[in-house]
Amino acid sequence: AGVAIATTLLFLAGSISFGTLHGVKVVAAQAIGARKPQVARAAAWQGLWFGLAVASVYVALAPAAESIVRVAAGDAAFVGPAGVYMAIRLLAVPAWLALTAFSEGLQGLGDTQTPMRFNLAANGLNIVLDVVLVFGLGPIPALGVAGAAWATLIAFTVAAALLGWRYHREVQRIQRPSRRAMADIVRVGAPIGVRWLLDVAGWAVLTALVARIGEAELAANQVAIRIVSVSFLPGHGIAEAACVIVGQHVGARDEVAARRAFLAALLLAAIVMTGMGVVFWLWPAPMMGLFSSDPAVIATGVVLLTYAAFFQVLDAVAMTAMGALNGAGDVRFVMFASIASTWMILVPLGWLLGVQLGMGAPGVWLAICAEIAVRAAVTGTRWARGGWSGRAIFEREV
């Protein structure tokens, strides 16, 4: 419980910074299209300097971690462990942001495999260190919750250092901080960061609403979210690829190719997510049964997965359109559309249907369906009508 509440607070606090570093990818992709390879390769370094400056704030908050948790959760039994875990994880933020900056920079250049390999290695190291540090091994004492946090800190630090060394050696030597280059990244990335922050906050409020309904409803909600992530995460990956490819075409002033890239990404995302939607529709009970034997949890989860089956195609449209619009530089529109759909539809409608009308978690998921439908319609229409046109960041060099 302590790790869960600390992780929630960390992602809520860190979402704006990590979202802003998403601007590194957009800047690098558009610079590649504009035939400015030096600018593209330097983007990761400028993202690093920005990230390290921001990380100092998180590190400074580490001594107050337990107080922060207590404000958020009250004097619960898990506040002490949560404070310990959060304090150590706050010390890991510099490495976390550095790993993000280099990963986003490489993805913007079109290299998605190197960040994947380093992140997989970091997760593998994290798992091994978890076993050793949480439970102890030989002369190493069992550190429990603190061991889990130290494992993550060490894994992030090693991965960030190695990926930075790889970037320095094979892509771009260290670049000094540039106010103008960092301003480009922040100008593009800040709306993405604000969107991430308010999206995470909206989902936190939604989870709190479900928690008020009952334990079985909350358990079903959390299990269903984990199952649906099997389709969401591949769809998100395709949307990120659309962001890079569309960004490169927009930087090259080739809007026809950008439209083709969007349609290809949309088709692929729709195929993947629709296929998973069919699975959710046909076998919801066995999938819920993998996570719980509670009949109430399974019964509620079956309804939630049925709703999820219907919104898969709409979610594919929304994610792909948002990724493509971000790559085109239309980040402010995506921010406003996302904030409006979350806070004007998802949260109030979830409260109305789930709590006030007594529909429980299924009512909340009906609100999710409505929000995704509106987001897909708004962002899809924006792309189709070309509202993103002419938003290239750089002048193209011949």
Image (tube, rainbow, N blue to C red):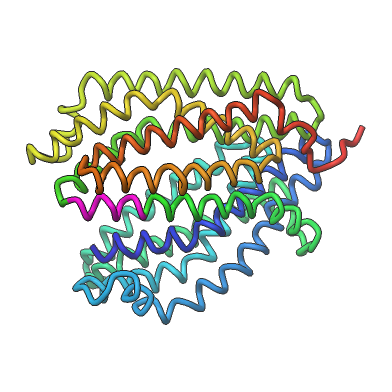
In the image, 44 versus 204, the foreground residue is 204
* Residue 348 forms part of the magenta stretch: no
Q: Residue at x 20, y 35 (%)?
A: 301
Q: Which range is magenta? A: 205-213
Q: Residue 228 appears in which quarter of the rendering?
A: top left
In the image, 237 versus 368, the foreground residue is 368
In the image, 60 versus 274, the foreground residue is 274
Please identify the dominant SS of the magenta region: helix
Q: Residue at x 44, y 52 (%)?
A: 200
| Left or right: 190, with 276 as reference point | right
Q: Is residue 353 visible?
A: yes
In percent of width and height, residue 394 lies at 83, 42
- Report the residue that reaches farthest toward the front: 357
In percent of width and height, residue 362 lies at 24, 37
| Left or right: 327, with 143 as reference point | right
In percent of width and height, residue 190 lies at 64, 55
